Amino acid sequence: MNRFDFSILKFTPDSQRGEVMNVGILIYLANGVDIRILQSVSKLKAFDSHLNLNVLNEFVSDLEWVAKGISNPEKLHQIFQGQFSISKPGYFTVSEMSDYEIKANSLMDKFVNPIKSKRKAGNKRLVTNIKEEFQKQGILGSSIDDISNHKVVTSYPIAENEGLFAEFLLKNGSYHLTETLDLRTEQHRAKLGESALKALTIDKAKDVFQGNLKSFVIFAAENASQERNAKHQLNILGEHTDNMFNLCSKQDMAAYYEHMISAASGYNHH
């Protein structure tokens, strides 16, 4: 049995707000360290517009240099406790060294990489609910070409080469963009990455439409506890969107649908 200690590499953009993003893993080897980092530029920039892969790579270079002289995981944890930090070490075991790469990739998927498939599944009920209401009101388009007919269209490409699509978009002189976030889940880390991506989508849309944009986020939280557990996710989105509505609030959704129906009717609703 082969045992390896490992730590999670973390990034804290603002210590006062306490939002922390896992950006990589550090595996301690007999002759050095194996460092693997997040490759999602979108996720990094949504947390901090000044952060990019170059900044992250510089941190990795510093860490590799220090690790040459200090191989003790506990000491490295104590040294790196700034904006970039290292968690206390954990460990994993593999029966055969041929399983090492599989386990390392598994750790990246578990702690660092965005969870795309689960994210889509988690939001399906929420998106379907909104689409059904738009369909009922007769304002849901059948294709993205219906954007020209004052219809709400889905999956509208904002920056297709960057993988950024608006979940819902309506045009009536101004653009009205809606993103969704289902918080009725225990997958808080996945939702943190998802909220960052949605914030980035909104910001990109502001650039693409030259500021002629009204943006909304519809989130689903059934109780105050779910909202508290997702305060970081909601804070991220709140800084980027014009308004937020809770799907589970009849008052919120009445206000949202009133706005969208008025906009689809050709009125500039403020």
Image: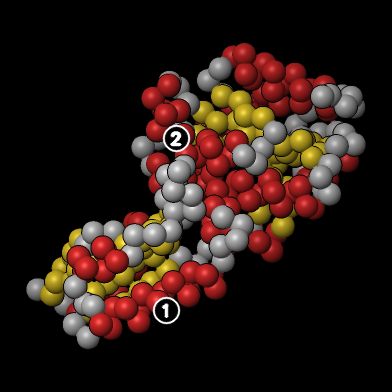
C-alpha span from label 2 to label 1: 33 Å
Q: Residue drawn at (14%, 71%), measured in percent from left and top? A: 3
Q: Where residue 140 sits: x, y (%)?
A: 75, 32
Q: Residues within 10 Å of mark 2 (few under 14, many from 20)?
A: many
Q: Is residue 138 above or below residue 166?
A: above
Contact? badges 2 and 1 (CB < 8 Å): no
Q: Where residue 101 sits: x, y (%)?
A: 30, 75
Q: Quadrant of residue 167?
A: top right
Q: Which mark is residue 61?
A: 1
Q: Is residue 241 above or below residue 266?
A: below
Tell me: 157 left or right of 181. Answer: right
Task: Name the residue nearer the viewer: 155 or 230.
Answer: 230
Q: Which mark is residue 253?
A: none
Q: Quadrant of residue 151?
A: top right
Q: Residue furthest bottom?
A: 31
**SS of the residue under disc 1:** helix
Tell me: 172 left or right of 252. Answer: right
Q: Quadrant of residue 26?
A: bottom left
Q: Where residue 241 sits: x, y (%)?
A: 66, 37
The amino acid type of the residue labelled 2 equals Ala
Q: Residue drawn at (35%, 56%), measured in percent from left and top? A: 111
Residue 82 visible: yes
> Sequence-wise, which precedes: disc 2 or disc 1?
1
**SS of the residue under disc 2:** loop
Q: Residue drawn at (46%, 42%), measured in percent from left and top? A: 17
Mark 2, residue position: 230
